[in-house]
Every structure is written in structure tokens, then in C-alpha cells.
Image (cartoon, rainbow, N blue to C red):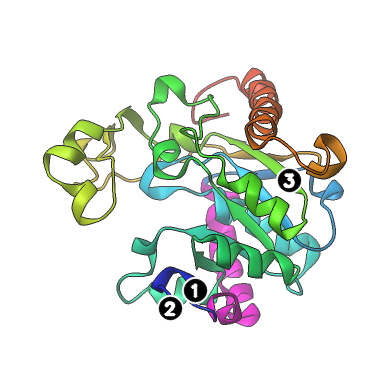
């Protein structure tokens, strides 16, 4: 019997017509509220590709909508953008909407199927650890030691496309990941969640996820980087840790460049 997070139909649920409608609805928010830019899509490879990205914005992470609106605007809806996601995203009445617009349960099986089918798969190796990083570390690439994405790209024989974003982590002040708090209330046991982030924002001030503060209209810039052919650069039997270190180094350099361009928080 298949485990819930490896359902064989995960990638077949994508609905291009619904996705196009959704992109039309969210584009004014992405381009208006966040004044988002995506750079570097001209060098995006054909076929399956694993987009490895930093994750920003806490509960209101805009990384996927920012990337997807420009990707679909440039390439159309013949090639789906899938996002590997935590099971909790599919709970409740919106679960089917997420599945039909490209979000798939995070597993090596689902990633492999999507990549081999020619899809673009977005992965945030740092996950919730990254998306709730403290504001003091907002421009630091930190995957929390997770390297499984390298094996996913190798298994499917696709390039890694590093992508970095800046601005999303400015939508409120992130104070702590709250790992101690998550353990104290046993979220790690109940929901496989190891953090309970503490932040300060508008309009409620201090928050530990609840009450939910609204995201500030911070400018978000995403830079898509040169694809990395792992076998061509590291050989037929590459060291996963070495590849991971290289990917993070490339991403950190690009994020530093974006940070150097930024003049003011939120405004950009």
C-alpha cells in the first residue's frame, strides 16, 4: 500500500486552466503589493528541472507565487510548476485547490515522477527552518543541513537551478524560530513541526503564529541562476555534501549581490 505522501496521482492532479485563472487573480497582488521582479528566466533549461530556492516570509511566503507568475507568463502553461510541500498544506477544504495548482506532497517518489515527466519542481530544502529564520539572518542561505535535493536531481537526471529571493523576510520582524516552544507544547510529536516562531508585526504586535499579522508591502526580487549539471561538474559519482556546499555557495553569493543593491527595508 502506498503511503499518503507518495500517492501515485499527485502530479496528475495539476489543472492548467485553473492554474492560469489563479495566476490572473494573484498577479495584481504580486506585482502591486510586492512589486515583484523575477530575473534570469532567459537561461532557464528545457525539460525537467529542480529549482532549489531559499524560503522567506513566514506564514505569507510569496516565493512560489512570485516565481510562478513570471514563469507562466514567459513559458505558458504547457509545462507545470510543481512545489514540494508539507502534508499540512493539504489539510482542510483548500487542499484540493493546492493539488490542482501544482503543490505536491514532499517525497522523493513525487519529485522523481514530476521531474521525469518534464515538470519544473520547486524545492525549499530549508523548509520551515528557513522560512522563519530570524530577521538578523534574513540574507543567509541556511538549509539546516538538508541535502536530499541533490539526490533527487541525480536520480531524475535533471539540472539544479538555484534561485534566490530577497525582501520576503521583511514582511515582519522575525525574532526566533521558537524551537524550544514547539517542543514545550509537543508540536514536534503532534504535527511533525519543530518550530513555533515568534515574530512582531502589524497589526497585533507579538505573535507565535497566532494572532496572524498581515504582511507588509515589501518589494521582492527573485534571481534565477545558471543551471548546474551535477554530473558534468562533479563526475558520475559525485559527493552529495560537496554538491550541496557548491549550491549554497553560489546562492549565497547571489543573495549577497541582491542585498548590496537594496537601499531600504520593505521599500527595496
For label 1, the residue is 99
Query: What is the magenta range?
Result: 9-33
**Residue at x-position 43% and y-position 40%:** 131
x, y percent for residue 101? 55, 72
Q: Earlier in the sequence, mark 3 or mark 2?
A: 2
**Residue at x-position 47% and y-position 26%:** 138
Examine the image and state in which quarter residue 177 appears.
top left
For label 2, the residue is 96
- Specify the principal SS of the magenta part: helix
- Residue 63 is one of the magenta-drawn residues: no
- In-front residue for pair 124/168: 124
Real-space CA distance between mark 3 and mark 2, rounded to the nearest whole angstrom: 28 Å
Examine the image and state in which quarter residue 202 appears.
top left
Whether residue 53 is visible here, answered yes or no, is: yes
For label 3, the residue is 161
Examine the image and state in which quarter residue 90 appears.
bottom left
- In-front residue for pair 141/148: 148
Real-space CA distance between mark 1 and mark 2, rounded to the nearest whole angstrom: 5 Å
x, y percent for residue 159? 77, 50
Quarter of the C terminus within the rendering: top right
Mark 2 element type: helix
Question: Would you say 235 lies left or right of 210 here?
Answer: right
- In-front residue for pair 23/133: 133
Q: Are marks 1 and 2 in contact (CB under 8 Å)?
A: yes
Q: Earlier in the sequence, mark 3 or mark 1?
A: 1
- Residue 21 is one of the magenta-drawn residues: yes
Query: Which is closer to the viewer, label 3 or label 2?
Result: 3
Label tally? 3
Residue sticking out furthest to the front: 237
x, y percent for residue 104? 51, 67
Mark 1 element type: helix
Amino acid at each position: 500500500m502506498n503511503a499518503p505522501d507518495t500517492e501515485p496521482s499527485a502530479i496528475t492532479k495539476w489543472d492548467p486552466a485553473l492554474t492560469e485563472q489563479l495566476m490572473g487573480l494573484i498577479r495584481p497582488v504580486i506585482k502591486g503589493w510586492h512589486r515583484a521582479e523575477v530575473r534570469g528566466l532567459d537561461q532557464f533549461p528545457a525539460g525537467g528541472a529542480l529549482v532549489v530556492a531559499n524560503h522567506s516570509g513566514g506564514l505569507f511566503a510569496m516565493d512560489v507565487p512570485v516565481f510562478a507568475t513570471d514563469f507562466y507568463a514567459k513559458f505558458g502553461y504547457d509545462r507545470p510548476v510543481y512545489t514540494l510541500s508539507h502534508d499540512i498544506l493539504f489539510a482542510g477544504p483548500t487542499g484540493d485547490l493546492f493539488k490542482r495548482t501544482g503543490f505536491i506532497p514532499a517525497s522523493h517518489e513525487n519529485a522523481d515522477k514530476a521531474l521525469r515527466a518534464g515538470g519544473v519542481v520547486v524545492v525549499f530544502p530549508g523548509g520551515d527552518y528557513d522560512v522563519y529564520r530570524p530577521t538578523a539572518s534574513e540574507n543567509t542561505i541556511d538549509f539546516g543541513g538538508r541535502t536530499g535535493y541533490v539526490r533527487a536531481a541525480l536520480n531524475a537526471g535533471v539540472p539544479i537551478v538555484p534561485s534566490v529571493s530577497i525582501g520576503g523576510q521583511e514582511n515582519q520582524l522575525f525574532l526566533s524560530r521558537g524551537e524550544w516552544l514547539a517542543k514545550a507544547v509537543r508540536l514536534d510529536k503532534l504535527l511533525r513541526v519543530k518550530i513555533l516562531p515568534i515574530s512582531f508585526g502589524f497589526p497585533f504586535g507579538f505573535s507565535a503564529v497566532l494572532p496572524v499579522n498581515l504582511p507588509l508591502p515589501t518589494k521582492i526580487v527573485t534571481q534565477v541562476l545558471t543551471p548546474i549539471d551535477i554530473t558534468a561538474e562533479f563526475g558520475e559519482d559525485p559527493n552529495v555534501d560537496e554538491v550541496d556546499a557548491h549550491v549554497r555557495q553560489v546562492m549565497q553569493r547571489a543573495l549577497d549581490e541582491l542585498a548590496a543593491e537594496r537601499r531600504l527595508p520593505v521599500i527595496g
